[in-house]
């Protein structure tokens, strides 16, 4: 009886020990697995270009062991940012990243910073994690409602930029109104306009197009530089557009100047011929009035009549040339750039239309991806054809 009781007690003790050991093993195993899995726990520092952030990673030693420093990648909102790691501390489980705009991360930064909220400038919530090249990024607590603020555009820099742009554009508009900065070349027209102010020359389509692309490109360039720090952002197609607009303005100016020069040359020739005819007519008139009358009076009268008719024809030509060479007054910006001597012309409308379309595409591209668009060759050729057509049609136009 006593022996059986001892045996039962021993079995009970063994069973209790087995249960305790099993429970301990089961409870310890998940903890051990969880403790060896790297995970982003926290982020500190200002998350914006040209600043540093520190990422705290649980079990960092397990992640970076036998891994080259350059293979550790920072992920913001899923976009990989390579070659950013500045330092690592496995004792404090921290990785320090220097947020720079390098060639390997250019596309990621363009996507992260593109389409920003600008009025007013706002930060953007992004998830933050890290990973090893060739592997998926590790789990992170910095996501969803706990996402980190990415500063896209500095408020102070943006408002300074906007202030400068507004002042420069305002100054340029004032110059447009008060000077000939984008008006046709040539002498000023006479007379007064409807506001009882001196008439001004007509606006030039070529110069207006050149000014449009100048301000669009330079403001976009400064904005991209302000947001990314990149200054090598001018695409070859953008340079081609500037060249096309400059060539259009230069070609139009050369043609206008050439036509004025031809007109002045013709006027000089006609005036000399007129002066010669007037001298001849005066001489013939004095001969016909001589006393006694000359024997060839009939011949002299006939010759004088012919020269007077010739003088009348030359005088008419001079009036037509003077009228054609007369500088016409401005009738308003849009009417001036779209009109020639026959009224609104399609070739001018075509140039203006393509300029506006490409300008809208240009602005949208800069806003979406913080990069100047690289227009295809075919589109540039179309713009060049439109500008060439405009230049070609200027040859038969009357000089305004």
Image: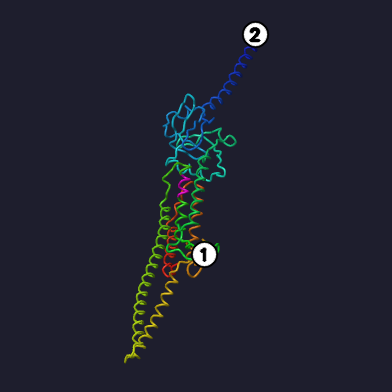
As for residue 222 lying within the magenta part, the answer is yes
| Mark 2 residue crowding within 10 angstroms, few (<14) / some (14–19) / many (20+) | few
Q: Quadrant of the C terminus?
A: bottom left
- The residue lying toward the viewer, choosing from 151 and 165, is 165
Q: Residue furthest left?
A: 295
Under circle 1, the secondary element is loop
Mostly what secondary structure, the magenta segment? helix
Circle 2 residue? 3
Q: Is residue 10 above or below residue 142?
A: above
Q: Quadrant of the N terminus?
A: top right
Q: Residue 147 carries which label?
A: none
- The residue lying toward the viewer, choosing from 379 and 307, is 307
Under circle 2, the secondary element is helix
* Residue at 56% in and 41% down: 122
Highlighted range, magenta: 218-224
Frontmost of labels 1 and 2 is: 1
Q: Residue 192 carries which label?
A: 1
């Amino acid at each position: 009886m006593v022996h059986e009781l001892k045996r039962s007690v021993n079995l009970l003790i063994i069973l209790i020990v087995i249960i305790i050991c099993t429970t301990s093993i089961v409870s310890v195993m998940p903890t051990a697995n969880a403790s060896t899995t790297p995970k982003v726990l926290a982020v500190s520092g200002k998350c914006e270009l040209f600043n540093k952030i520190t990422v705290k990673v649980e079990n960092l030693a397990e992640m970076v062991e036998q891994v080259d420093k350059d293979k550790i990648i920072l992920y913001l909102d899923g976009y990989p940012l390579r070659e950013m790691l500045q330092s690592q501390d496995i004792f404090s489980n921290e990785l320090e990243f220097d947020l720079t705009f390098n060639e390997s991360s250019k596309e990621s930064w363009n996507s992260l910073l593109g389409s920003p909220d600008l009025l007013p400038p706002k930060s953007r919530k992004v998830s933050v994690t890290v990973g090893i090249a060739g592997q998926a990024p590790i789990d992170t607590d910095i996501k969803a409602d706990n996402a980190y603020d990415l500063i896209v555009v500095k408020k102070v820099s943006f408002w300074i930029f906007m202030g400068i742009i507004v002042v420069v554009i305002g100054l340029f508009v004032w110059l447009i109104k008060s000077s000939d900065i984008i008006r046709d070349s040539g002498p000023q027209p006479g007379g007064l306009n409807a506001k009882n102010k001196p008439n001004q020359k007509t606006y030039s389509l070529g110069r207006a197009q050149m000014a449009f692309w100048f301000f669009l490109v330079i403001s976009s360039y400064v904005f991209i530089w302000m947001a990314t720090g990149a200054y090598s952002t001018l695409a070859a197609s953008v340079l081609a557009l500037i060249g096309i607009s400059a060539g259009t303005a230069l070609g139009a100016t050369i043609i206008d100047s050439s036509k004025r020069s031809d007109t002045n040359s013709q006027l000089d020739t006609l005036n000399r011929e007129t002066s010669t005819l007037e001298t001849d007519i005066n001489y013939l008139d004095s001969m016909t009035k001589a006393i006694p009358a000359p024997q060839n009076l009939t011949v002299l009268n006939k010759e004088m009549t012919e020269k007077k008719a010739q003088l009348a024809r030359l005088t008419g030509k001079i009036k037509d040339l003077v009228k054609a060479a007369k500088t016409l007054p401005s009738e308003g910006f849009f009417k001036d750039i779209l009109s020639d001597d026959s009224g609104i012309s399609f070739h001018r409308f075509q140039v203006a239309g393509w300029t506006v379309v490409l300008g809208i595409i240009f602005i949208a591209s800069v806003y979406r991806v913080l990069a100047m668009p690289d227009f295809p060759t075919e589109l540039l050729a179309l713009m060049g054809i439109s500008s060439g057509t405009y230049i070609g049609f200027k040859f038969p136009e009357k000089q305004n």
